[in-house]
Image (spheres, rainbow, N blue to C red):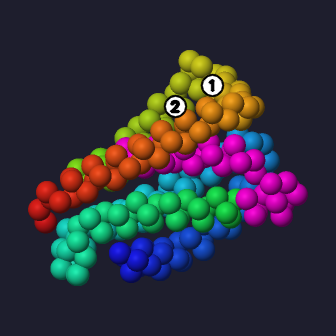
Amino acid sequence: MLNLIRKDILLQKNEFLILLPALFIYLFFGTSITSITWISIVFCIGIIMVVFSKDEKSSINLLLNALPYTRNEIVSSKYIGAIIWMAFVLLTISVGNWIMHSEMVQWKQLLLITSIVVIFISFAFPFCYLFKSRYLMNASIVLFCLYLVIVNTFIVDLNDRIRNIVHTILSLENTQLYLFVTLSVVLLYVISWILSIRIYRRKVF
């Protein structure tokens, strides 16, 4: 299974090196907490889904299943790999923010980013194993267009509302609430992991 994770890292190495400068550019211009949070979420989800989509072809799946790996290991490598890629992005953002703005990213902010990304992946992976990631991409494009219409037509201050919600969440001091959210997100990820394994076991290529 470690070789499968290593394979994904090596295949995406060039793309990741290209994305790093773009990430630093966004960090340079986006100094607000909301901007950094948004950038982190987009980059995490983007990289994870690109890595996932590389193995969706039937020919690739046939090759993977011909290798000495179980279907459990193939699915597990994606879930473990998603955490690794997310850690790479968050580490890059933390270091980049410290270098450019001389301040560390708050742990609450990192927890918020991680929670949103993990929740997305928990729903996206089973969906993509059941169908294809391109359907999720199409839905994302439609939702983004809908968001632009809403912002420009109906709720012009939507970005300000989102910004206020983020600041409100980060200003909370209830440790038990953060612990509850963390445990809930971890549980959701584990359930998603098990569900994806069951879906992938039944797939025919």
Label 1: which residue? Answer: 158
Rate crowding at label 1 as few (under 14), some (14 to 19) or many (20 or more) other CA atoms within 10 Å. Answer: some
Q: Which quadrant, please, contains the C terminus?
A: bottom left
Q: Overall secondary structure of the magenta stretch?
A: helix
What is the x, y in percent for residue 202?
14, 57
The residue under the point 74% across, 55% down is: 27
In the image, taking residue 62 as reference, residue 25 lies left or right, namely right
The residue under the point 66% across, 49% down is: 110
The residue under the point 71% across, 48% down is: 107
**Which stretch appears magenta?**
94-123
Q: Amino acid at mark 1?
A: Leu
Q: Which mark is residue 107?
A: none
In the image, taking residue 204 as reference, residue 18 lies left or right, namely right
Q: Amino acid at mark 2?
A: Tyr
Label 2: which residue? Answer: 147
Residue 62 seen in the figure: yes
Rate crowding at label 2 as few (under 14), some (14 to 19) or many (20 or more) other CA atoms within 10 Å. Answer: some
Residue 28 seen in the figure: no
The residue under the point 11% across, 62% down is: 204
On screen, residue 38 above or below 9: above
Alpha carbons under labels 1 and 2: distance apart: 9 Å
